Image: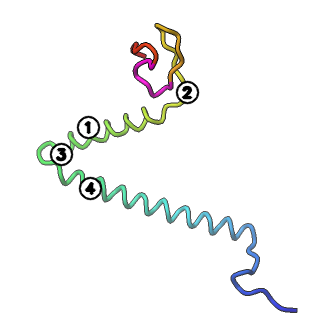
Amino acid sequence: MRSLPHSADPVEPHEQHAQHEQHEQHARHEQHGVLCRFRSEVYACLDARADALFELADAVLCAYREERNRVGSIVCTKCREENPATFELCWNCGWSL
């Protein structure tokens, strides 16, 4: 009876899961490193009041991310038209949502 080549050997499900988890952990570690380097470079660009400016920039970016991730819809109080939750004005009548 011929044996399968090493690359075709069946891998136990728990080994596959462990390998997947290890790969995911490595990817998260790399992403964290990229983010840390980016934050350090941005901070280095700021002169006077670097801490305050950095906190302000971070707050703006976090608010933008939250806004872009809103889901659902909003009904306009003026024309009763349904709008995506990310809209600030009604697409139908221009009323502020």
Q: Amino acid at mark 1?
A: Leu
Distance between the Cα atoms at labels 2 and 3? Answer: 37 Å
How far across and down, in percent of the image, does residue 36 sit? 34, 57
Q: Nearer the viewer, mark 2 or mark 3?
A: 2
Magenta span: 84-91
- Looking at the image, which residue is at 69% across and 71% down? 15
Seen as rendered, the residue at the extreme front is 92
Q: Is residue 27 above or below residue 63?
A: below
- Looking at the image, which residue is at 12% across and 48% down? 47
Q: Which structural element holds mark 1?
A: helix
Distance between the Cα atoms at labels 1 and 4? Answer: 15 Å
Query: Which residue is identified by label 4?
Result: 40
Q: Nearer the viewer, mark 2 or mark 1?
A: 2
Label located before the other in sequence (3 or 1):
3
Picture quarter with the N terminus: bottom right
Query: Which residue is identified by label 1?
Result: 56
Query: Which residue is identified by label 3?
Result: 50
> Is 73 left, or right, of 47 in this rendering?
right
Query: Which residue is identified by label 2?
Result: 72
Circle 1 packing at 10 Å, graded few (<14), some (14-19), many (20+), is: few
How far across and down, in percent of the image, does residue 56 sit? 26, 37
Question: Is residue 44 in the magenta section?
Answer: no
Q: Nearer the viewer, mark 2 or mark 4?
A: 2
In the foreground, 83 or 53:
83
In the foreground, 3 or 34:
3
Asked which quadrant contains residue 62, the reply is: top left
Q: Which structural element holds mark 2?
A: loop
Seen as rendered, the residue at the extreme right is 1
Label located before the other in sequence (1 or 4):
4
